Every structure is written in structure tokens, then in C-alpha cells.
Image (spheres, rainbow, N blue to C red):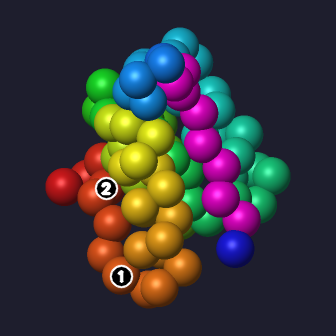
């Protein structure tokens, strides 16, 4: 599995938005990523720019990211930017 992601993480584990998400999702897909961990406040922008075939996983905290990775590993549904 090739998973990419971005965001700022504060000392409480909150994942904050970043700039340039539209470029980062394209670059990740070009590098072979099939899944991208997206700060929840960047979801709309990421969804509007994401190449076909790149799953956008919405995360608000570091715990969300770890739980999403576990769910992906186990084949369970994850929260996405699309819904």
C-alpha cells in the first residue's frame, strides 16, 4: 500500500490545515500513492483537485490518522473527504 499525507500536528494531536494541498495530492498520485491523509479543514480543496483513483481520508487528529490507517489495513471503511 502506498499512503501519503500532510498537515500540521500541534502538541495536543490536532491536525491543522496546510497550504498547497491541491499540488500535494497531484504529486502524491504521480508518485504512486493510492490513499492520502487530508486535514479535515482541507477536504474541500483536496477533493476539488484530487486525481482519479486517489482516496482522500479525512483526519482531524493524530488519533484519527492512526485509526484510519488501522481501518485501511483491516479493510474497513474510513472517513473520506467525499462523505
Above or below residue 35? Residue 48 is: above
Above or below residue 70? Residue 38 is: above
Q: Quadrant of the N terminus?
A: bottom right
Give, as a single range, the part of the protein colored magenta: 2-9
Residue occupying the point 28% across, 58% down: 79
Query: Which residue lies under the disc numbered 2?
Result: 80
Depth order, front residue of 34/16: 16
Q: CA distance from mark 2 to mark 1?
A: 12 Å
Q: Secondary structure at mark 1?
A: loop
Q: Is residue 15 visible?
A: no
Q: Secondary structure at mark 2?
A: loop
Residue farthest left in this picture: 83
Residue occupying the point 65% across, 49% down: 4
Above or below residue 24? Residue 81 is: below
Q: Where does the image place residue 75, in percent across and percent down from the top left?
A: 44, 86
Please name which of the two marks, 2 or 1, marks the residue nearer to the observer: 1
Query: Which residue lies under the disc numbered 1?
Result: 76
Left or right: residue 58 compared with residue 20: left
Q: Where does the image place residue 64, in percent across and percent down from the top left?
A: 37, 49
Q: Quadrant of residue 40?
A: top left
Q: What is the magenta segment's predominant secondary structure? A: strand
Residue 50 magenta: no
Amino acid at each position: 500500500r502506498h499512503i501519503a499525507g500532510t498537515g500540521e500536528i500541534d502538541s495536543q494531536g490536532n491536525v491543522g490545515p496546510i497550504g498547497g494541498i491541491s499540488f500535494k495530492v497531484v504529486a502524491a498520485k504521480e508518485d504512486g500513492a493510492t490513499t492520502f491523509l487530508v486535514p479535515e479543514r482541507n477536504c474541500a480543496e483536496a477533493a476539488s483537485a484530487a486525481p482519479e483513483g486517489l482516496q482522500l481520508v479525512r483526519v482531524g487528529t493524530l488519533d484519527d490518522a492512526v485509526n484510519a490507517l488501522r481501518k485501511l489495513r483491516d479493510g474497513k471503511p474510513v472517513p473520506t473527504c467525499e462523505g
